[in-house]
Amino acid sequence: MADIGRLGEDKAAEYLVSQGYKILARNYRIRGGEVDIVAFRRGVLAFVEVKTRTGDAFGTPAQAVDEEKIKRFLKARKDLTEHYLKNGKIPVKHKFFTFNRRVFSLRNDIVEVYAFKSGEIKSINHIKEAF
């Protein structure tokens, strides 16, 4: 199942890029917390939890984000926010240059990835401001 989870994170990152986001970090871990993806688009710094499921027998992927998971997520987000936000701007790399972009808002998102057991992706659902 770990392979399905990793595949889901890869597909979620690809999806976010296709929607115009720049991926700033993946699998950011600190003691007691983790954020799967940090993405930036149009002044929004999004902290993303990715949940991948092959079915909904135990609920939707978003329903798997319980209070304990949110607590660990927010702990890592606090650390990341301090790291990325310097004077309200973050460095965003483009092909040949790095630009400082202003951050207007922070957001906690969930990306639900539905996959077949074979690893093929059924669908992706991006829930903005999930918690």
Image (cartoon, rainbow, N blue to C red):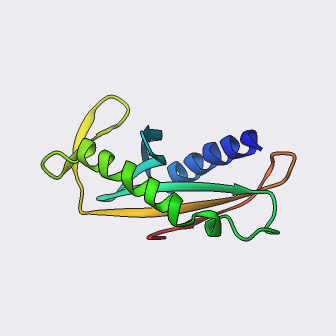
| Picture quadrant of residue 71 | bottom left
64 over 119 or under it: above or below: below
Q: Position of residue 73 (x, y in %)?
A: 45, 54
Q: How many numbered tags mark residues here?
A: 0
121 over 64 or under it: above or below: above
Q: Is residue 31 left or right of residue 101?
A: right
Quadrant for the N terminus, please. top right
122 over 10 or under it: above or below: below
Whether residue 30 is visible here, answered yes or no, is: yes
Q: Is residue 8 left or right of residue 23?
A: right
Farthest residue to the left: give it.
Answer: 87
Q: Position of residue 121 (x, y in %)?
A: 76, 53
Which is more toward the observer, 59 or 48? 59
Q: Position of residue 84 (x, y in %)?
A: 26, 44
Which is more toward the observer, 18 or 77? 77
Which is more toward the observer, 32 or 115? 32
Quadrant for the C terminus, please. bottom left
Which is more toward the observer, 53 or 72? 72
Q: Is residue 66 left or right of residue 80?
A: right
Whether residue 47 is visible here, answered yes or no, is: no
Q: Residue at x 32, y 46 (%)?
A: 80
Q: Residue at x 77, y 68 (%)?
A: 58
